[in-house]
Image (tube, grey):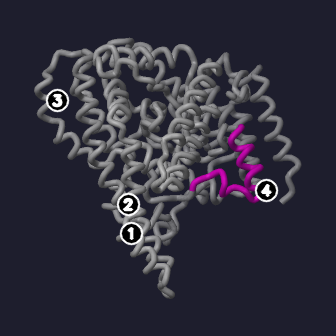
Amino acid sequence: MRRISNLILLLVCATHVPIVAHLQSFYAFQKDDTLLRRNYYEQTVKKKQMALASVGKEHAKDYKNLYEEQFKEIGSLWQSSRPVTATEAHGYIQSIVNKIIASNPELKGTDARVVFSRDWWPNAVSMGDGTIVINAGLFVYMNNEAELAFTISHELAHYYLEHTPKKIKNYIELINSDSYQAELKRIKKTTYGAGKELENFAKSAVFGSHRHSREFEAAADKQGLSFLKNTGYDCNAARTTLELLDKIDDSLLYEPLDLGKVLNFSSYPFKKKWIQKESVIFAEVESSSSFTDREKDSLKTHPDCSKRIALLADEINAAGAGKQQFVVSEKLFQQLKKDLYIEMSEECLRQKDLSRGLYFHLLMLQSGENTECAVYAISRGLNLLYEKQKDHKLGQAIDKENKMYTADYNLLLRLLDRIRLEEIANLNYALCNTYAEKMKGDAKFNEEMTKAKRIKESSTF
């Protein structure tokens, strides 16, 4: 459940755990180049030193605090298992980056470092120091290499146009303005309702920042398309990428998850009570915030996509047809989409984001793809779920139902919230027994099955 912090998302965005080594017979997990990742981290450290050294006297504390936040987030990325620096995947994305740079002389000498990440949420981000990240959660939805090339071009444009330092400057000037400070003092003197008023005031600063962000997004679209036009890629990818971003919250790679089917076993049938709708269930589903629908749209990392498409329409049409959707490798593009889905699903479990990890692996199991990988991950996830619930720490590992989530994910969240300890034990043991023959010979799966059996037999309720 690691996301870029709200402040850094607003201002900046524009050691691999060997737990999966045994699955090589099922899926060959990406083996990251740790030296490359270390090199990228060291470059970030140097950029931090340069940023801190550049701070003048005016608002020095605010600038230093923001730089510390920014580079803490970037540093934590490079020191985690999230970046994909494995030779094949990283080499592929570098081939596209190199094509863009070679086709645009103004990018010559750039120190941008572009990587895939194993993060599940559909986003791409230029973090301000040259680090550019294309999340697996976005890449797996892309239709072709040209869309990936436009996304990279867009993020390179953010860096080229220096949007991060401009965002930071705009924000600091806002919060230090006379009008802002006067209003802040007035609110603090209020004895009744001060907390709510402060919250609303903070939101006004956030949305003020996002008005600038819209301008930066439009500028990055325009500059990114300019970069793309010189590469030989199909420029219509700018339109289709933005169309993808506009609907991505409701997009599905697989058929919606049917829990009653995928978790129904002859030895332990699915219990409808786990997901049964209650009369007040929709009153219980929490919204992620008190924001209105208009505000929520404003908070999208890539807001107003239809307006952004309209702004680019003439240039896209002028670019004409006849260019390519694939330049480097269609075969590798399609393979990496499958691979990074598995990588991001595993990363969720590695980060103890059990609800997302289980959701992605249950979809995988339901689809019939990489069944062995999915079964092992689900059995492991259910054992972890049991431990979290027993230790009264379940809330740290699962999301709560939310109107902004897809219906099938909300049903899984309802199940995870309602299922009792003994039911988790019985369900997991039934899963393991059902797939035991298919998983025969896998030592790590056998460990999880043994654990599930021990939990089932030793638990007292």
**Residue 297 is inside the magenta segment:** no
Instruction: Using the numbered discs, state the Cα–Cα distance from disc 1 to disc 3 in whole angstroms.
Output: 41 Å
Quick one: label 1 or label 3, which is nearer the N terminus? 1
- Checking the image for residue 391, the label placed there is 4
Q: Is 110 above or below relative to 460?
A: above
**Which of the 4 quarters of the picture holds residue 246?**
top left
Position of residue 144 measured from the top left corner of the image (x, y, whole percent): 34, 23
Position of residue 267 measured from the top left corner of the image (x, y, whole percent): 71, 42
Q: Amino acid at mark 2?
A: Leu
Quick one: label 3 or label 2, which is nearer the N terminus? 2
Instruction: Using the numbered discs, state the Cα–Cα distance from disc 1 to disc 4 in whole angstroms.
Output: 45 Å
Q: Residue at x 49, y 46 (%)?
A: 55
Q: Farthest residue toward the bottom?
A: 191
Position of residue 199 measured from the top left corner of the image (x, y, whole percent): 46, 71
Q: Is 38 above or below relative to 191?
A: above
Q: Amino acid at mark 3?
A: Ile
Residue to which mark 2 is pinned: 174
Quick one: label 2 or label 4, which is nearer the N terminus? 2
Quick one: label 1 or label 4, which is nearer the N terminus? 1
Instruction: Using the numbered discs, state the Cα–Cα distance from disc 4 to disc 3 in whole angstroms.
Output: 56 Å
Residue to which mark 3 is pinned: 316
* Magenta-tinted stretch: 380-399
Instruction: Using the numbered discs, state the Cα–Cα distance from disc 3 to disc 2 in whole angstroms.
Output: 36 Å
The rendered magenta stretch, by its main secondary structure, is classed as: helix
Residue to which mark 1 is pinned: 180
Which label lies toward us, 3 or 2?
A: 2
Residue sitting nearer the eye, 332 or 279: 332
Q: Amino acid at mark 1?
A: Tyr
Q: Amino acid at mark 4?
A: Asp
User: Are the residues flagged by discs 1 and 2 in contact, CB closer than 8 Å?
Assistant: yes
SS class, disc 2:
helix
Q: Is 29 above or below relative to 456?
A: above
